[in-house]
Amino acid sequence: MDRTDSTIAELMGLVVDLPFAYFRLKAAGDRMAGRVGQTTGKWGLMRTLHDQGPHTVAQVARSRPVARQWVQRLANELEADGLVEFVDNPAHKRAKLLRLTPKGESVLHQMVKRETQWARRIATDFDLRGLRTTRATLRKLRDVLARQRD
């Protein structure tokens, strides 16, 4: 097996392993988010708004990529809970911007605190160099897939 075949085999193994890791991470995230009455989807939307500032629902959907309707549903639920609000968008008359409220920032802080405690518990099973390599590989995979159509 040459280097290219080995790379292909390892990439295919990564593609198989990622969904299994994702579902276990999602289950852990659901447990953490559920303790403050949220879901991982809402948590992710709130984190995006915290990290990147106000966005339209369409902008968030394009960045994921997920259906705009899915993001709209999450946004509506978060708004009903007083965690986000729709505000006027100076760049568009009809497409409102979605932003976190102070209550939303507080709930997000609670979720991040739980996440940090969880990460602290499992961090001893990992080494820093390996984590950095893994993150770099996943970012590269994400970027390559973003350019692909198949």
Image: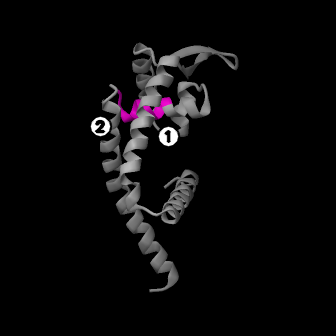
State the residue at coordinates (37%, 45%): 118
Vertical comparison of 23 with 39: above or below: below
* Amino acid at circle 1: Pro
Q: Secondary structure at mark 2?
A: helix
Q: Which residues are magenta?
A: 38-46
Vertical comparison of 87 with 56: above or below: above
Q: Is residue 45 magenta?
A: yes
**Foreground label between 1 and 2:** 2
- Res 84 visible: no
Compared across the picture, whether 8 is left or right of 54 comes to left
Q: Which residue is mark 1?
A: 65
Which image quarter: residue 116? top left
Choose between 11 and 34: the one closer to the eye: 34
Compared across the picture, whether 124 is left or right of 103 comes to left
Q: Position of residue 137 (x, y in %)?
A: 53, 62
Q: Main secondary structure of the magenta part?
A: helix
Here the colouring is: one colour
Do callouts 1 and 2 mark residues in contact (Cβ within 8 Å)?
A: no
Q: Position of residue 103 (x, y in %)?
A: 47, 18
Mark linked to residue 31 = 2
Q: Position of residue 71 (x, y in %)?
A: 45, 28
Choose between 116 and 103: the one closer to the eye: 116
Q: Secondary structure at mark 1?
A: loop
Q: Position of residue 27 (x, y in %)?
A: 30, 43
Q: Characterize the local packing of mark 1: few (<14), some (14-19) or many (20 or more) Cα atoms within 10 angstroms.
A: few
Q: How many marks?
A: 2
Choose the circle earlier in sequence order: 1 or 2. 2
| Residue at far bottom of view | 1
Choose between 143 and 36: the one closer to the eye: 36
